[in-house]
Amino acid sequence: MRILYELSWLWETLGIALVAAAVCVACAALICKAAKKKLSIRVLAVIGAAAFVGAILAVILIARTPMPL
């Protein structure tokens, strides 16, 4: 049980990254729908993967920044 508690930051990071990726994919789909362009599944997958990696990097960078007192 202690291991799950110690790894809670990992689950939070993955959750944040998944939500960010889903939002980016939804925005891309809505933009293409408004522009009346056809968007393939492969392009959506690339956008989702890039957003996932970007969100993980953003969380890591934010976590390393010390909070001002």
Image: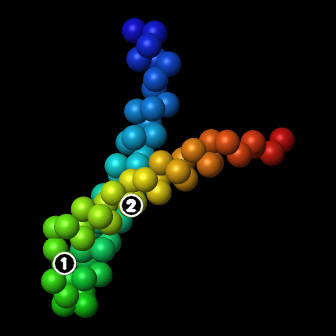
What kind of residue is marked 1? Leu
Foreground of the two, 55 or 43:
43
Q: Residue at x 19, y 90 (%)?
A: 36
Q: Residue at x 46, y 23 (%)?
A: 7
Q: From this viewpoint, which residue is outermost toward the top? A: 1
> Residue at horizontal 42%, vertical 46%?
16
Cα gap from disc 1 to disc 2, whole angstroms = 16 Å
Horizontal and vertical percent position of residue 66: 75, 42
Question: The N terminus appears in which quarter of the rendering?
Answer: top left
For the C terminus, the quadrant is: top right
Look at mark 2 in the image and give the residue it sits on: 50
Identity, as a three-letter code, of the amino acid under mark 2: Ala
Mark closer to the chain start, 1 or 2: 1
Q: CB under 8 Å between callouts 1 and 2? A: no
Question: Of all residues shown, which one is farthest toward the right?
Answer: 69
Dot 2: what SS? helix
Res 51 → quadrant: bottom left
Residue 46 visible, this angle: yes
* Among the 4 quarters of the image, the one containing residue 22: bottom left
Instruction: Answer above or below: position of 36 versus 53.
Output: below
| Residue that badge 1 annotates | 39
Task: Find residue 42 and report its image quarter.
Answer: bottom left
Q: Secondary structure at mark 1?
A: loop
Give the percent coordinates (x, y) of residue 5: 46, 17
In the rendered image, the vertical position of residue 24 relative to residue 66, given as above or below? below
Q: Nearer the viewer, residue 52 or 27?
A: 52
